[in-house]
Image (tube, helix red, strand yellow):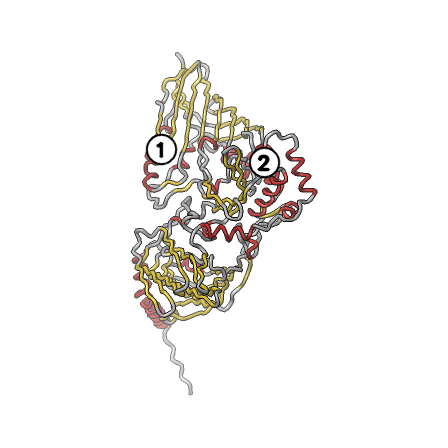
Amino acid sequence: MTTTLHHPRPYRDLLVTLCTLIFAFSSYSQITSEYQRYKEQYPNSNSVRLSQESTLTIGLDDGKFKITQDISEEDIYLDEGAKNNAKQSLSFSTFYDLESIEASSYVIEGGQYQKFSVSDFKEKDDLDNAFYDDVKSLSFIFPRLGMGAKTKLKYEQTIKNPRFLFAHYFGGFYPIVKNKFTIIVDKDINLLFKEFNTDSIPIKYSKSQNRKSNIYTWELRDMDEFKFETRSPTYKSILPHIIPIISSYKYNDNIIDVGNDVTDLYNWYYTLTQDINRDESSNELIQIVNELTKGKKSELEKVKAIYYWAQENIKYIAFEYALGGFVPREANEVFNKKYGDCKDNASLLYKMLEIAGIQGQLAWIGTRSIPYSYLDVPTPSVDNHMILYYENKGNSYYLDATGRYNPLEIPTSFIQGKEALVSMGKDSFMLKKVPIIKSQKSVYKDSATLELNGNNLKGTSKAQLTGYTKINFFYELEKQDSREKIRDYYKWFFEKGNNSFLIEQFTETNLFKYDEDLTVDYDFNVSNYAKVIGDEIYINLNLNKSIAQLKTEEDREMPLEHNYLDSFQFQNTFIVPEGYEVDYLPENIDISNEYINSSIQYELTDGQILYKHHIEHNSLILDLETQKKVNSLIKKIEQGYKEVVVLKKNN
């Protein structure tokens, strides 16, 4: 006979609850020794990298490089957002292969960590706007991630070109407990080590050797996370890292240079471009050049006509494989297809100028996402872009046809302040620094005539845009595909007073023109703007408060980077209503330092108030100390924004 024992339900529920609590406590006790320690140490972090180790092995086999890099990473997740990190990927390309990969999750189950290995890896192309774009990715998902879970990742890379060694980062946007970088290199190979942002970091460095190799080791413990903040400069200018460079090697008693200095890099680059455009130019290409330059009186006018044609007609598409990412396509091919990447545009511009009897020069350059100079890092890590350099009467021009609306005199904003490596032939090059365009060249000027209709503000305005301000305006405007959307964009861009601002009608002059200022004339209305109290009217003539975009938060930890320098000029002519006189006019404000200057001025004349507001900023990157100085001045202007004009009815 089988006997079944039944607990009364309250007791059964109590047992279940106790078992659940015991299991939960058991599981929790497993994570407290590690999870709780890091949760307390880094309460605001989502994860902690427990270990990050990389071993780079560089050898020679009959004069050919054999380079491998073994990488391992272990992370622990401190909140339920862990699942957002489940999807991961590794990249590879013609220049480096993934040889092996192991990935596993470790999840608390039954009071201890259970291992769940990743078995599904999916390969796909990674298409972006990189200089060489044959990168593929291997995607995978860490299973069952949650609070307290850990992940481990190990993989090996084979680096096929000795110029493409990876930087090793000692910091990240997460805490790192243990970080170790080891290089094992044959004694016949000479290395350079370029360190960035490591001055205040206590990295332990050691060097040893065995019979065949030199061994270099860098180790760092307990590195706090770096705070990610919008409008910060590239992470490469913030995070501490080392770039190893193979400078030379010995083979058969000969010293062969690889990356000693910029000369070695240029010599390699030149071999990749020396044979382009050897074919005869097509009749169609010659014809278009002749048409573009016909009747142009000066060489500069001819260059401008060719440059603007390329910007308008050659679509920018980056899609490259292997060394094709460094070798420009033939000008005939680019012209026929009407698309290409940066170096293809440079190749076509070079040939078109040549057909016109004008000399241009191919030039390599890094965008502002790369903070290195050619003298510091003479490897392909220093640049990611190609343009055409042109010189006329001592003036330098940087022709980048990927910049759709840039006039000849204004380089694309993302290469301002950067070095260009300009090809001058087989054994000759120049390093030229692209200028930072002053704020007076990029102006948003708005002049309005204002009057009151009851407590509504009505006005007519003329806005003029120049330089980068105009260029960015064009980029956004071309996205608007209807008159209504254009009106909505104008309402947002030209907004005055408050969000009740409405544009009633508008007309444009010089739309999408390279060399002329864009002008937009518009009528507008701001409802319920003025306050009428008894026989007094209160009105704030500070309709545009653009200085706010230059202000940073007091607790900001990172430098601030602007895309470009610009200035603002706002002028409002307010017609005093009939039967009223000005009872109070705010005081003028004028502030300035080397980074920013601004003013607000009021002038009463002939029944009108002339209001002028000027803003100008003069530094692309502001460090923390500079931000404090700028914020201090901005506060004074913001106080001025609160001032109102008081009108009083005549007796």
**Image position of 13 with respect to 269: above or below:** below
Q: Nearer the viewer, mark 1 or mark 2?
A: 2
Q: Position of residue 241 (x, y in %)?
A: 38, 54
Q: Is residue 358 left or right of residue 61?
A: right
Q: Is residue 255 left or right of residue 408?
A: left
Mark 2 surroundings within 10 Å by alpha-carbon count, few (fewer than 14), some (14 through 19), many (20 or more): many
* Image quarter of residue 184: bottom left
Of helix, strand and loop, which one carries label 2?
helix
Q: Is residue 143 visible?
A: no
Mark 1 surroundings within 10 Å by alpha-carbon count, few (fewer than 14), some (14 through 19), many (20 or more): few
Label 2 belongs to which residue? 303
**Image position of 558 with respect to 491: above or below:** below
The numbered mark at residue 82 is none
The numbered mark at residue 594 is 1
Q: CA distance from mark 1 to mark 2?
A: 36 Å
Q: Is residue 500 left or right of residue 194?
A: right
Q: Residue at x 52, y 39 (%)?
A: 398
Q: Is residue 182 visible?
A: yes
Amino acid carrying label 1: it is Glu
First in sequence, mark 1 or 2: give its number: 2
Given residues 603 and 625, the one toward you in this image is 625
Q: Position of residue 138 (x, y in %)?
A: 51, 62
Amino acid carrying label 2: it is Val
Of helix, strand and loop, which one carries label 1?
loop
Q: Position of residue 368 (x, y in %)?
A: 45, 45
